[in-house]
Image (tube, grey):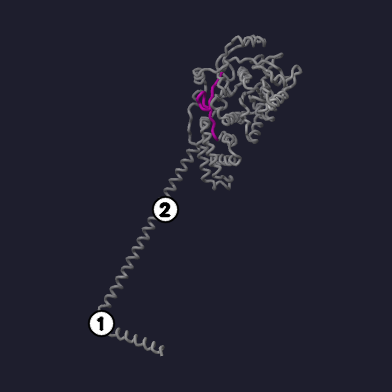
Amino acid sequence: MYTEGKILVGKGENPVFLHPKMANRHGLIAGATGTGKTITLKVLAESFSEMGVPVFLADIKGDLSGMCKAGATNESLEKRLGKMGITDFDYHAFPTRFWDVYGKAGHPVRTTVSEMGPVLLSRLLELTEVQEGVLNIVFRIADDKQLLLVDLKDLRAMLNYVGEHNTEFTTEYGNVSRQSVGAILRALLALEDAGGQSFFGEPELDIFDWMTTDEKGRGHINVLHCVELFQQPILYSTFLLWLLTELFENLPELGDAEKPKMVFFFDEAHLLFNEAPKALVKKVEQVVKLIRSKGVGVYFITQSPSDIPDAVLAQLGNRVQHALRAYTPAEQKAVRTAAQSFRVNPNFDTEQVITELGTGEALISCLDEEGRPSVVEQAKVLPPQSQMGPVDEERRKLVIESSDVYGKYEKAVDAETAYEILTAAAEKEEEQKKKEAEEAALLKEQEAARKEKERQQRAAASRSTSRSSSSTRRSSSRKSPMEKMANQMLNTIGRELGKSVTRGILGMLKR
């Protein structure tokens, strides 16, 4: 609830306020399932909106859509507000926009493969270090050749191109094995099966469309419908990290402003860090540290503070701790860690109170106007001013179609990008190869015809020579009867002489 220029989060012995100037110092909403984290998230989001600060939040269960409709009072809420001494509580709707990666329950949210980059995409595809290196090379080649990677078919075409021409790139970019390219292509198939192709394309999201206010000066609450997206934890967490990085990369330095330019709620934050490579965790730490100067506040929602790395946890100055259970040694350690993160209140034992908090109650500590953590207070969190549960599909559709960005993102655009360019080049190369093959075949045919002609000419010449020789033999064999008789007599004398010589010689040997 935004009142007196501050956000009233809850009330116990003392009211607990979140100062707008300290809202970009980030925050944490923690607690076991069913302890009231979602209510706290709604209260803060509504208050930021009233302050004129745009908000982004992920709706995992589908029950945050009620922000577009005014809440209604009941006896339980009246008693709660009465105990808190609040008499001017106003139920009303908030300017809400619905978004959905799959484009079913809100305006489609898309980005391009080039925009996401190889680091986040490697996490999304769950690549090994070697495969990530190959993907980096593929992106570098695409950048150098000015080939825009918009959707997954662009990336697939680029991978195939680099794989087929890998020897050409080895000297300049490094070794690209076909095995690694094949592994990345298989990972792309898995991403497509998870619905990832819906996320990549054009028109891509303009992050500044989320940083707007309505005609009353209230910040738009951008609700991302995540009921389906959350079924793919890697896609969900990588998508939210991309949004955070997009804000960081595009917003100018702001310094210490009177209020944030935007507040980002990261629900189920533990998914961001689960099994994430150290390099990626370092990147998250860097973004969280530096994005404050861009005027963006980041609020992590998770079950236990231990779900968040210490380096990130140290940046979260505003904390709301709902009840934790302590049945196992690990849970008891988590409770002890959570209690130690608060500035001690001498009126109660923080560690004990954490396990005794009821639904809607929390231990709250926010930064004061000087940036110092306040003493932790046990307080009841205010109820939201909008509807508690979800709205029906008819109301959702009405909100979507009446939005000022309706029609901007609904129709996907398939421009000429890497896929079209590489496909055209491959077809041209194939045509050139076909033409060269046809020319080679024609030359071969002509050469065979030439050789056949030469063979025929040689054969003809040989036959001519043979006929001349035969004619000579025939002419020489035409002899007179007298010549034939003389030849016959000479042959007979020769044979007889041969027999005589043989015999004489043999006879001499016998002697």
Quarter holding the N terminus?
top right
The disc placed on residue 484 is 1
At a point 66% along the width and 31% down the height, the residue shown is 285
Q: Position of residue 41 (x, y in %)?
A: 62, 20
At a point 64% along the width and 24% down the height, the residue shown is 303
Quarter holding the C terminus?
bottom left
Q: Quadrant of residue 268?
A: top right
The residue sitting at the left extreme is 481
The disc placed on residue 197 is none
Dot 1 surroundings within 10 Å: few (below 14), some, or many (20 or more)? Answer: few
Q: Position of residue 67 (x, y in %)?
A: 57, 17
- Between 353 and 500, the one lying in front of the other is 500
Residue 393 at least partly seen: yes
The residue sitting at the front extreme is 510
Dot 2 surroundings within 10 Å: few (below 14), some, or many (20 or more)? Answer: few
- Between 247 and 505, the one lying in front of the other is 505
Q: Position of residue 238 (x, y in %)?
A: 59, 31
Give the magenta-colored segment's residue range.
95-113
Badge 2 is on which residue?
440
